[in-house]
Amino acid sequence: SAITWDPDNKTFVKTKPTELKGRVMPKVISMSDACGTLNSIKLIDYNMSVVNSEKAVRVTAEDIQLDEALGHFIGMMIGDGWVSRQGEFSSHSMICFANVTKELVDSFKSQIHRLIPDYDMNNIRKDCSKHMFQGYDCYSEKYTVTNTSLAGNIDNWICAKAANKRLPEFFLSAPREFREGLLAGLIDTDGTMNWSKACCKKNPQFSVAYSTVSINLAHEIVLLAKSFGIKASITESV
């Protein structure tokens, strides 16, 4: 399938080759009315599928604005976060985030409180670990939130396991500020930035790179960058 612009609904859609007639397949996506058509979403209460769900802490029933903070949270979860569960309908689904940067940890906690306001923030578990990696002394921190209701939503947004990670399906229809936060969250976790000078260039160039084993995520990040008019490409490495 391909991602194309539907002029009737003014949105990007997945299109089969046989359905391309009347739609535009852009070579480079730039800022346009294609983005910003979706301003909020409603969370799904996945607690309904577990035993004793009446005692569970639920996600907010309010519509969630697709703002920069939520975009940043989802970007961070794609980079350094994951959902862990003991079974398909486990009552112990966990949202995990591994990072040592205080500002990012505070941002993670802020969005947890926003999305599940009745959750006792004192129940967020912090695990610290000192270990060796490639001959270097390392230190890591992991923060765990046990909440099936929010875990189901995050799983739906970004998918489970590194090789399956992806951006939320609505990212191209979200407002610019959400997409800016999404890109920032990705870079803040698994991204790198540097100045480099190629032998054929007169001046050094600034570049941003993002590493992932998910080919779908790689292609979607290229689309995300191009929605701002940023040139982006994919390079395979071993």
Image (cartoon, helix red, strand yellow):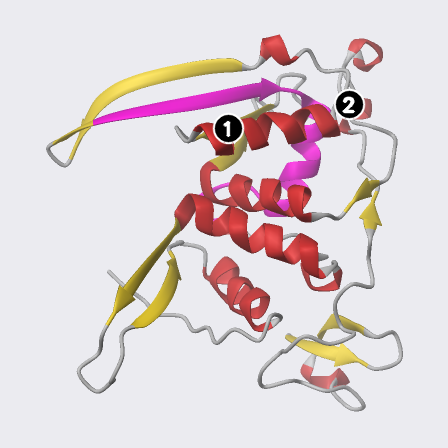
Q: Quadrant of residue 236?
A: bottom left
Q: Which residue in the structure is indicated by mark 1?
A: 105
Q: Quadrant of the C terminus?
A: bottom left
Q: Is residue 72 magenta?
A: no
Q: Position of residue 112 (x, y in %)?
A: 66, 27
Q: State the CA–CA distance, disc 1 to disc 2.
A: 26 Å
- What residue sits 52% from the left and 73% below the top? 230
Question: Is 60 positioned to the left or the right of 78 in the image?
Answer: right
Question: Does label 1 or label 2 sit earlier along the sequence?
Answer: 2
Q: Quadrant of residue 65?
A: top right
The kind of residue on which mark 2 rests is Asn
> Quick one: 174 or 195, which is closer to the camera?
195
Quick check: can you spot residue 165? Answer: no
- What residue sits 46% from the left and 15% below the top? 126
- What residue sits 61% from the left and 56% below the top? 180
**Foreground label between 1 and 2:** 1
Mark carried by residue 189: none
- What residue sits 87% from the left and 74% below the top? 9
Q: Which residue in the structure is indicated by mark 2?
A: 47
The magenta segment = 138-163
Vertical placement of residue 117 versus 202, above or below: above
Vertical placement of residue 36 versus 123, above or below: below
Q: Secondary structure at mark 1?
A: helix
Q: Position of residue 90 (x, y in %)?
A: 65, 20
> Quick one: 74 or 44, which is closer to the camera?
74
